[in-house]
Image (tube, grey):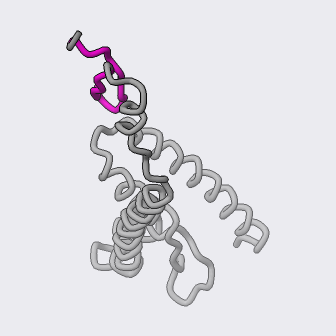
Amino acid sequence: MFSEADYINGWLAYGVGAIVGLWCWWYLLSKLPIRPLRPFLVGAMAGFLCMPWYSAENYHFLAPAWVVAASEGLFDGPEYFWRAGTPLIIAIVVMAVLGVVLQILFRWFITSRKKPEEDSHSAADAGHDDVTEYRVGSRQRAMPSKSS
């Protein structure tokens, strides 16, 4: 049997590994061209890796729920998967939705903090009548007009 110190050291090692795994997952998803899918997948992976569950019935030590569900489903039969599988699936869904909600709140917070842009036409009209403005991508450029 493991002592309580061994148990805590095991969770610390697993926690560091989960953090490194989530960082690698985030880095891989940063290359994904579909931006709205990223927070959903990162949240789902966080729920998958971070959900603990009791390692056995009538046992007070916890283990990662995916390990408990996989081992019980594999060695005891598919019907035993659901003892830890149900809370694991609930955690995955909740964390995926939470990832999307946090992304929406973050974008709303960032866009609400931006100050309204000053009217660029009033500055151009003040002393530069011969300048025509146009947009290329996200930049605004000034080009002399050809009215002369």
Vertically, is 98 above or below 129?
Answer: below
In-image side of 76 versus 5 (left or right): left
Vertically, is 41 above or below 105?
Answer: above
- x and y percentages locating residue 11 in the rendered image: 66, 64
> Which sits in the foreground, 54 or 120?
120
In-image side of 3 versus 15 (left or right): right
- x and y percentages locating residue 12 in the rendered image: 69, 60
In-image side of 8 versus 68 (left or right): right
Splitting the image into 4 quarters, where does residue 94 fall? bottom left
In-image side of 13 versus 4 (left or right): left
> In the image, which residues are magenta?
131-146
Q: Which residue lies furthest to the left in this view?
A: 147
Q: Main secondary structure of the magenta part?
A: strand
Residue in view at x 56 percent, y 54 percent? 18
Residue in view at x 65 percent, y 53 percent? 16
Q: Which residue lies furthest to the right in this view?
A: 5
Quarter in which the N terminus is drawn:
bottom right
Residue in view at x 29 percent, y 38 percent? 33
- x and y percentages locating residue 135 in the rendered image: 28, 29
